[in-house]
Amino acid sequence: DIQMTQSPSTLSAFVGDRVTISCRASQTISPWLAWYQQKPGKAPKLLVYKATNLASGVPSRFSGSGSGTEFTLTISSLQPDDFATYYCQRYKYDSYSVTFGGGTKVEIK
Amino acid sequence: QVRLVQSGAEVKKPGASVKVSCKASGYTFSGFFIHWVRQAPGRGLEWVGWINPDNGGTNYAQKFQGWVTMTRDTSSSTAYLELNSLRPDATAVYYCAREVKGFDYWGQGTLVTVSS
């Protein structure tokens, strides 16, 4: 099975900071990488699909990059609403399996 | 608008079974896979498996093979997740999600608590 490793597991930042979250796959998965935001007690929300495509309605301060086995989610200027946990996910339409990263909790500094 | 509405919270004793429903609306149910994802208290997201609503085909994560069953009823646009032989470590919120470009719509989650 493909393993997905996120780093860091926790991140403390100020409002306005540029934040990057990394995700590494145990083998090449390009471009089948998605990013989700989850707030306590809520379902996850899709932010980015196919590594670099912003989902509908997602603010432009979010962006995804990377290829092969290394991927990054960037928040260009952290806003109060962005404090949440973020997950990467390896997926593919009609895929045999799906794997989530362990999550990165973004906290207020 | 697209909506996935799940059934309410359940409390079950060890060894029992539970069936969680996920009713879809606002799109063609048979057109897109439905996935199930679980989240144990304080833990991350864990993929359970998918069902193809068009033909009923399924694929389960290896960890869940043998104790989960996914079905669907196309007449009511509803997907089901049945968990059998429940153990306390099955306590979690179970989500359904539609796959289009990633998992673009999610249900609100169903808390299943397994306790004696």
Image (cartoon, coloured by chain):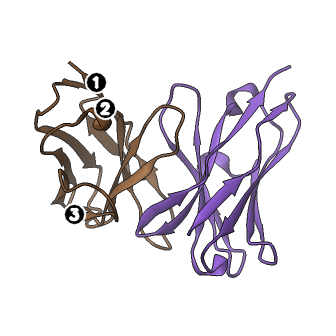
Chain colours: A brown, B purple
Q: Please state the horizontal and vertical placement of residue B116, each as a whole percent of the image.
A: 86, 19
Task: Write the residue at 17% across / 46% down.
Answer: A74
Q: Are marks 2 and 3 in contact (CB under 8 Å)?
A: no
In the rendering, which numbered label is found on residue A52?
3
Disc 2 versus disc 3: nearer the observer: 2
In the rendering, which numbered label is found on residue B75?
none
Secondary structure type for disc 3: loop
Q: Nearer the viewer, residue B24 or B89?
A: B24
Residue tagged 1? A107
Of marks 2 and 3, which one's residue comes earlier in the chain? 3
Task: Write the residue at 28% across / 24% down.
Answer: A107
Residues tagged by mark 2 and mark 1 found on one chain of the structure = yes
In this rendering, position of residue B36 left or right of residue A109: right
Q: CA distance from mark 2 to mark 1?
A: 6 Å
In the rendering, which numbered label is found on residue A83?
2
Q: Chain of mark 2?
A: A
Kind of residue indicated by mark 3: Thr
Secondary structure type for disc 1: strand
Q: Nearer the viewer, residue A1 or B47?
A: B47
Q: CA distance from mark 2 to mark 3?
A: 21 Å
Kind of residue indicated by mark 1: Glu
Q: Are marks 2 and 1 in contact (CB under 8 Å)?
A: yes
